[in-house]
Amino acid sequence: MRAVAFAGWLKRQGHSGAQAARRLGVQPRTLGRWSRNWRCRQMPVTLRGRPQRMTDPLMPVVLRQHLEAMGPATGLPTLRALFPDVTRSALQDALRSYRHQWHREHTLVTEHLQWLVAAAVWASDFSAADAPIDDCYGHLLLCRDLASHYQLAHQPAVTPDGRTAVAVLEMLFHIHGAPLVLKTDNGSPFICEAFLALLNAWGVIPLLSPPRTPRYNGAVEAGGGALKLQVHYRASDHGHPGRWTSDDVAGAGLQLNVALRPWGPRGPTPQELWQRRPVITSGQRARFIDCVAAMREQIREEHGMAGEFLEELPRAAVAREAIRRALIQLGYLLVQRKRISPPFNSPLWDKIR
């Protein structure tokens, strides 16, 4: 077939059939016979190897049902043991087709968030202490700047309450200035009237996590885990591993800020990056608030909800997306997306499912 195609191409270039045969290393009459057979459709393409054999017309359906029940990690030896009358090539084709479809249907889109401007977005949360602090505190109020990884606060607290949250955040606003956005969960300390009034007075937009989604505020969760590990080490070094002190907590927070290098050994520490933070002006704050409001209206129009009254959950979902779009548009957030297909036997897929 390729010889006939090559001869036809040479003929279109102005060469004769004899010249084409000479280049192919065959006799001119042989090349002529191949060309005539091709024109008369007497040169069919034949597949090499043994033909696939399915003894039962319903066998492909049965085979597919078994694969769907056993999953894509099923191997060819298992299929050959279950279907001894089906040829190896047919089983391979069925398994390959099923795995290809499985990959298409289970492709996941992951997102990597890169916070670009220090002091623009903070995250806060209460975390239970692993040991009593000063024999009276059982929790820590954490606050972290997302772009610099700087630990702003790790305040011991008796219980998670709005009064503690208001006192600590108001102190931080006076010392460092207020961020544009504060990420929190839906806990009662962060949705109480006094706390929301504090944010409104300082022009801070609250970004609440979706219900039962702790990973949405995962940065402060991870920071809290690292902090508590350092507190444990310091308490052990000081001879009281089962009893933490406020000094242990303060020392651990300082160590995370001045010793860690999240961007590699040549990168800055959180404290160095925090000290170089820009000042958020009133104009930037007003522009961000206006952008969030515009994005909120745009999202409502996209979903046919313009002018409608929304219940609490839909309203919160619209607010989250509006804040996200505003952060991206104004250069505070970069979102990188990547498509992945988990391996057939990956624990990741078990967690997602």
Image (tube, rainbow, N blue to C red):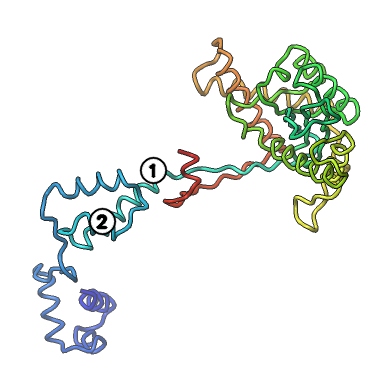
In-front residue for pair 201/133:
133
User: Residue 242: where, in percent of width, then height?
Assistant: 79, 38
In-front residue for pair 275/230:
230
Image quadrant holding the N terminus, namely bottom left
At label 2, the amino acid type is Leu
Q: Which residue occupies 81% across, 26% down?
A: 137
Label 1 residue SS: helix
The residue carrying mark 2 is 79
Tally of numbered discs? 2
| Image position of 154 with respect to 186: above or below | below
Alpha carbon of mark 2 to alpha carbon of mark 1: how far?
22 Å
Do the residues under discs 2 and 1 have CB atoms within 8 angstroms? Answer: no
Q: Which residue occupies 21% across, 86% down?
A: 21
User: Residue 249: where, in percent of width, then height?
Assistant: 84, 37
| Image position of 35 with respect to 30: above or below | above
Image quadrant holding the C terminus, namely top left
Q: Which residue occupies 72% across, 40% down?
A: 225
The label on residue 105 is: 1
Q: Which residue occupies 14% across, 46% down?
A: 58
Label 2 residue SS: helix
Number of residues whose C-alpha sits closer than 10 Å to that of mark 1, classed few (under 14), some (14–19) or many (20 or more): few
| Image position of 89 with respect to 254: above or below | below
User: Residue 200: where, in percent of width, then height?
Assistant: 77, 17
Q: Between label 2 and label 1, give the one nearer the viewer.
A: 2
Q: In this rendering, would 106 be left or right of 213?
A: left
Indicate the quadrant where residue 138 lies.
Answer: top right
Number of residues whose C-alpha sits closer than 10 Å to that of mark 2, classed few (under 14), some (14–19) or many (20 or more): some
